Image (tube, rainbow, N blue to C red):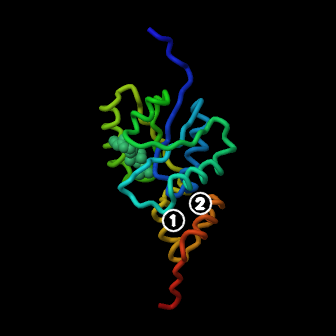
C-alpha cells in the first residue's frame, strides 16, 4: 500500500461573483488549518455571472496573494473529481445561518456518496459578515448602497467600473 501523504489539502469552491469579506474571513481562518487551500471557481455555463471567471480569478489572486499556502483555480464538472485530481481530501464550506444548512447538507451528502474518501468540513461564518452574500452585494451596490467594509477595496473598485448605480432619491 502506498504511503499516505501527511499534507492536508482542502478545496474551497464557489462562484465568488465577487469575493466578499465573508469569503475572505473564512479563507484567512482556513489557511491556518491546512497545508494547502485551493480556492476554486466553478465554471458554470448555465449561470450568467457579473464577472467572468478570469476577472474573478484576478480578484481572488489579488486579495489572496498574502497567503503563501492558498492557491486560486477554476473547475468544471464535479467538485469531488476536481478535489481528487488535486489530492484534496477536504471540501471546505461556510455556514452563515440555519437557512444555509439544508442546501449544504444535500451537497455534503451527495459529495460523500460520490467520493466517500473526501470529507466536507464546515466553518461558521464570522458573525460580522453572516448577513452578506455576493448576490446582496451586487444588488445593494447597483441601487446606490454603500458596500465598503463588506468587500475588499479592489472588488469595490471593480463593481464601480462594472455596475452603473441607480440612485432613486425621493421617488
Ligand atoms: O458559490 P456556491 O453557489 O455556494 O458554490 C456551489 C458549488 C460550486 C460548491 C457547487 O455548486 C458545486 O460543487 N458545483 C460543482 C458541480 C458538482 O459537483 N455538483 C454536485 C455537488 S453535490
Q: Residue furthest bottom?
A: 170
Using the image as rendered, state which of residue 114 and residue 46 is in the foreground: 46
- Nearest the camera: 49 or 107? 49
Q: Residue 71 appears at what percent x and percent y? A: 59, 39
Characterize the local packing of mark 2: few (<14), some (14-19) or many (20 or more) Cα atoms within 10 angstroms.
many
Look at 54% across and 51% down and name the residue there: 23
Q: Which residue is mark 2?
A: 151
Is disc 2 placed on a helix, strand or loop?
A: loop
Q: Quadrant of the N terminus?
A: top left
**Disc 1 designates what residue?**
137
The part of the image, by quadrant, that contains residue 149 is bottom right
Q: Which residue is at 51% across, 73% downward?
A: 142
Query: In this image, 81 relative to 59: left or right?
Result: left
Crowd band around label 1 with a 10 angstrom C-alpha radius: few (<14), some (14–19), many (20+): many
Cα distance in 3D space between marks 1 and 2 = 8 Å
Determine the residue located farthest toward the top in the rendered image.
1
Amino acid at each position: 500500500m502506498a504511503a499516505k501523504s501527511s499534507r492536508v489539502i482542502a478545496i474551497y469552491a464557489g462562484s465568488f461573483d465577487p469575493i466578499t469579506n465573508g469569503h475572505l474571513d473564512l479563507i484567512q481562518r482556513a489557511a491556518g488549518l491546512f497545508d494547502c487551500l485551493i480556492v476554486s471557481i466553478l465554471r458554470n455555463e448555465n449561470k450568467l455571472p457579473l464577472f467572468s471567471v478570469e476577472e474573478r480569478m484576478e480578484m481572488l489572486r489579488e486579495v489572496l496573494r498574502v497567503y503563501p499556502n492558498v492557491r486560486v483555480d477554476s473547475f468544471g464538472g464535479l467538485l469531488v473529481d476536481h478535489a481528487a485530481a488535486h489530492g484534496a481530501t477536504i471540501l471546505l464550506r461556510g455556514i452563515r445561518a440555519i437557512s444555509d444548512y439544508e442546501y449544504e447538507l444535500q451537497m455534503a451528502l451527495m459529495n460523500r456518496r460520490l467520493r466517500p474518501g473526501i470529507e466536507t468540513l464546515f466553518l461558521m461564518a464570522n458573525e460580522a459578515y453572516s448577513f452578506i452574500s455576493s448576490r446582496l452585494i451586487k444588488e445593494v451596490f447597483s441601487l446606490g448602497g454603500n458596500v465598503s467594509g463588506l468587500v475588499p477595496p479592489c472588488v469595490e473598485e471593480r463593481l464601480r467600473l462594472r455596475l452603473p448605480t441607480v440612485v432613486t432619491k425621493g421617488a
